[in-house]
Amino acid sequence: MSSGSEQAGVKPKSGAAAYLERSRAFVDACLEKALPPETAAPTTLHKAIRYSIFAGGKRLRPALAFAAAEAVGGSWDDAAPVGCAVEMIHTYSLIHDDLPAMDDDDLRRGRPTCHKVFGDAIAILSGDGLLTYAFEVLATCRRTEAIPGVIKAVATGSGTVGMVGGQVLDLEGEGKPATEASVAAIHRWKTAALITASCEAGALSGGASLKEAELLRNYGQKIGLAFQIVDDILDLTASPETLGKTPGKDLQAQKATYPAVMGIERAKLEAQRLMDAAKAELQALGARAQHLEDLALFVVERKS
Ligand code: GRG
């Protein structure tokens, strides 16, 4: 039997699309409460922070945190601080990445970048502010016994042997010959590490055992890498309107990417292989991990 929306000619949302929509509404309400209003001093800084964080974006990392908490029997409320923190850190990384000293980009999430609107200094400080708020909000996790593990997972994923270190490898690799191994090393840190932390910290905040946290970490590493492979492919194939950022930048900067070292078709197969391997990590968690399975599929099938 078809649903009402199908009868009306409206395509029903897939499992992941509906989950992302619900988790976006939830995390945006939590972020709204966690961050100071635009009217709070210093107003320029708080305006810039809100301009960037509420500019859109898929909110994939919070959704992963919520789904990981659910997969171990926890709730969205348990994982709300993790969802906010990883989105704050992700947004800070985008603001800093767009600066003239890094990727020098004018467009992000379909809008002029933070530094184009507020200037370089405020953009740098907005990123600093978001990173600091992330750890303040993590300290409010409901399961207080989980807080040290949650903080460690998020700090490792976003620090010098995680996202920040990956950004350094990425910048240093520009214009140099790349191999599959060197590209994987960059992507594991630059992109997969924060996605991994979202899954692991989300699970811990939901009461995961050490074994469950390890499964979720393994799942996160695999979909994190798949996410970046798809990002590399979209940079070559998607339009600025769909992406909300300038495509073709990787090629222009001679960046180390999967399509550059193995071609687009093999890169697509590698993303699929990683998705299958990620799903295999979920088997021991049973039906509660269904949303994580849907999100793994979303990661490889996404168009923006
Ligand atoms: C500057 C410390 C620092 C780190 C920068 C993550 C990163 C490292 C830079 C972001 C630039 C970039 C294009 C990275 C590749 C993958 C990625 C993180 C894409 C953007 O993530 P999405 O697609 O973005 O989840 P939305 O806007 O949907 O949230």
Image: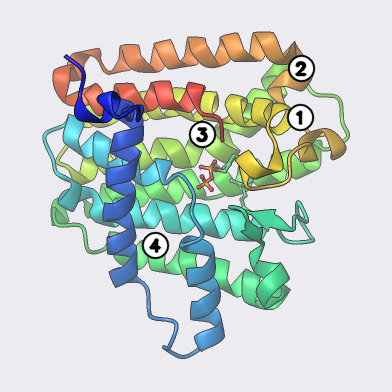
Dot 1: within a 10 Å radius of its alpha carbon, few (fewer than 14), some, or many (20 or more) residues?
A: many
User: In the drawing, what numbered circle is on residue 192?
Assistant: 3
First of labels 2, 3 by sequence position: 3
Name the quarter showing ligand 1: top right
User: Mark 4 and 1 residues: CB-CB less than 8 Å, in contact?
Assistant: no
Quarter of the rendering occupied by the C terminus: top right
Q: Is mark 2 within 8 Å of ligand 1?
A: no
Residue flagged by tag 2: what amino acid is it? Val
Dot 3: within a 10 Å radius of its alpha carbon, few (fewer than 14), some, or many (20 or more) residues?
A: many
* Point 46% across, 91% down: residue: 41
Q: Is residue 86 left or right of residue 190?
A: left
Residue flagged by tag 4: what amino acid is it? Ala
First of labels 4, 1 by sequence position: 4
The residue tagged 4 is 134
The residue tagged 2 is 261
User: Mark 4 and 2 residues: CB-CB less than 8 Å, in contact?
Assistant: no
Quadrant for residue 101, please give it.
Answer: bottom right
Q: Is residue 14 left or right of residue 106?
A: left
The answer for how far apart the CA atoms under marks 4 and 3 are is 18 Å
The answer for how far apart the CA atoms under marks 2 and 3 are is 19 Å
Quadrant for residue 114, please give it.
Answer: bottom right
Q: Is residue 60 above or below residue 137?
A: above
First of labels 1, 3 by sequence position: 3
The answer for how far apart the CA atoms under marks 4 and 1 are is 30 Å
* Point 18% across, 20% down: residue: 285
Residue flagged by tag 1: what amino acid is it? Ala
User: Mark 2 and 1 residues: CB-CB less than 8 Å, in contact?
Assistant: yes
First of labels 4, 3 by sequence position: 4
Of helix, strand and loop, which one carries label 3? helix
First of labels 2, 1 by sequence position: 1
